[in-house]
Amino acid sequence: MSSVQKALEIALGFGYQIDPSALKLLVKLGEKRCKKTGEADPSFEAIIKEAIALKGKSQSGLTIQSRDLKEAFPIIFDFVDTPIVLPEDPVQTEGNFLKSDVEVVKDPSGDIQPTGIEGFAQLFKSRYDKILHILMERPEARQITKISKVNMEKGNVKIAGLVFGKRPTKSGGIEVTLDDDSGRTTVLALSQDAKRSVGEITLDQCVMVEAEASQGRLLVKNIMQPDIPSKLASTSKKSVYVILLSDLHIGSDKFLEGAFMRFLEWVGGRSGISEEDQEIMRRLKYVVIGGDVVDGVGVFPNQEFELSEQNIFKQYEMVYEKLRLVPKHLQMFVIPGNHDATRQALPQPMIPKKYAESLHKLENLKMLGDPCLLKLDGVLILSYHGRSLDDVLATTPGLSYEKPEEAMKVLLRARHLAPIFGHRTPIAPETEDHLVIDVVPDIFHAGHVHTVGQDRYKSTLIINSGTWQAQTGYQANLGISPRPGLVPIVNLSTLDVVWKDFLTSSSINSRQAG
Ligand code: FE
Ligand code: ZN
């Protein structure tokens, strides 16, 4: 069935007709776009539904006319008729406001040096060394004793190592196995405080433990995490804004195209801009997209039944068709997620040209790896897809998908983006552990869990930027309720956040608190 026929059928399903001029417009749109994306253009469904919703609201009859389509999504139809010309804006052209102030501080794409299986020993050695170095910056961490040198009979001792295991004991305590480069030992948490501290650390992270030796046992007195220091966040001198997005899942039949088009309309200055937004629009400079831009192919069993497009190349072409509508004065950055077509093990190199050629060619879009550290107008943004949040949420008591920011704090305290090894997050054997958070970011951005979150931890702003995909069957089974269509916009001069809701046409000007 052609997409125009499909559009007619959808309209009829709601009791609407499409008038010939509107049909002609759809055919024109179809011709324009189908060269690239193939037969059934999923946009049509979103366009028709939006037009029907608007008509229903204004009670303007049961025939969809061309102006109804243009009203629903001016940006799409403008695109058919005329190229987009951005209005000149005094702020944007004033002085060198637009002069981009971008530094890619760290991108694993170029640094990856995979080794064989024996590389895991090197990887963990690197993790231990790097985090020990971070721990040593604190005065309490001086006098660390190597595990092989510990006197197990008496006295207080400080040791630092990777948490190799946690195990409840018969006496109601928790036994923690620690590993440093000299050996391995166990420490025992007996007090409530000690047991709570053990609950807050993840497997395979590096910690320092202060223990009391007594008759061949080491009793935990205190656990110290590397953590981030309290400092002042860096902010930009001028008031400029960055939009943080993630988890578009284009190609999924649950991709909320209507919501995403509304966002594109807004960001393109077309519609939905309130007076309050004007200032943001004039000072908006960057868009960071934290992975899962496509739904991918073969990511999980039977995924083909949940895709609107089964060809990975075409999925990226569809992403291009959307992101090309983002005004050219906005610099975009795209990192991959676990649904993208690149190495799955962390760190992930950028989505290669092979799969996403047109995205690579887009002049205002930069492809980067996951995780990556950016400096935008002097503000350090650590953007990480967030695969390991699943493992942190599954293994840390008291955490839930409703508050992903709490899981992100666990990573900041561990100073590691994916501490837990051998669960759901694949980690590549590398000579250097690139997942250590050695530089403290001003903004820590992640996605992946499809729920939103915002918090400040010490001086770092934490944002989880949600999704554009409606609830999947998989999430329904897990009881996860996604919060799609919400967009956090951060003022880099204050690190204040405004959330805009694009889920429905009436929600756009409601502002959400994080
Ligand atoms: Fe995702
Ligand atoms: Zn993901």
Image (tube, rainbow, N blue to C red):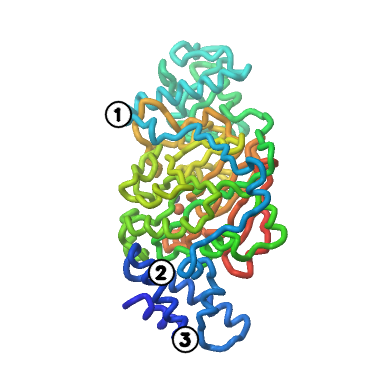
Q: Residue at position x 55%, y 12% from top?
A: 154
In the image, farthest residue toward the right: 275
The reply to whether the C-beta atoms of the residues labelled 1 and 2 are less than 8 Å apart is no
Mark 3: give few (<14), some (14-19) or many (20+) Cα within 10 Å.
Answer: some
Q: Is residue 172 visible?
A: no
Q: What whole-number distance in Å separates the C-alpha atoms at marks 3 and 1?
A: 62 Å
User: Identity of the amino acid at label 1?
Assistant: Thr
Q: Nearer the viewer, mark 3 or mark 2?
A: 3
Q: Position of residue 460 (x, y in %)?
A: 63, 37
Q: Secondary structure at mark 1?
A: loop
Which of the marked residues, 3 or 2, is nearer the chain's N terminus?
3
Q: Is residue 51 visible?
A: yes
Q: Which residue is mark 2?
A: 42
Q: What whole-number distance in Å separates the C-alpha atoms at marks 1 and 2?
A: 42 Å
In this orientation, which residue lies closer to the viewer: 430 or 171?
A: 430
Lateral position of residue 139 relative to residue 296, left or right: right
Q: What whole-number distance in Å separates the C-alpha atoms at marks 3 and 2?
A: 20 Å
In the image, farthest residue toward the left: 116
The reply to whether the C-beta atoms of the residues labelled 3 and 1 are less than 8 Å apart is no
User: Identity of the amino acid at label 3?
Assistant: Asp
Q: Secondary structure at mark 2?
A: loop
In this orientation, which residue lies closer to the viewer: 278 or 492?
A: 278
Q: Residue at position x 59%, y 64% from top?
A: 270
Which of the marked residues, 1 or 2, is nearer the chain's N terminus?
2
Count the marks: 3
- 122 over 250 or under it: above or below: above
Q: Position of residue 189 (x, y in %)?
A: 55, 29
Q: Which residue is mark 3?
A: 19
Q: Which mark is residue 115?
A: 1
> In the picture, residue 428 is in which quadrant?
top left
> In the picture, residue 351 is in which quadrant?
top left
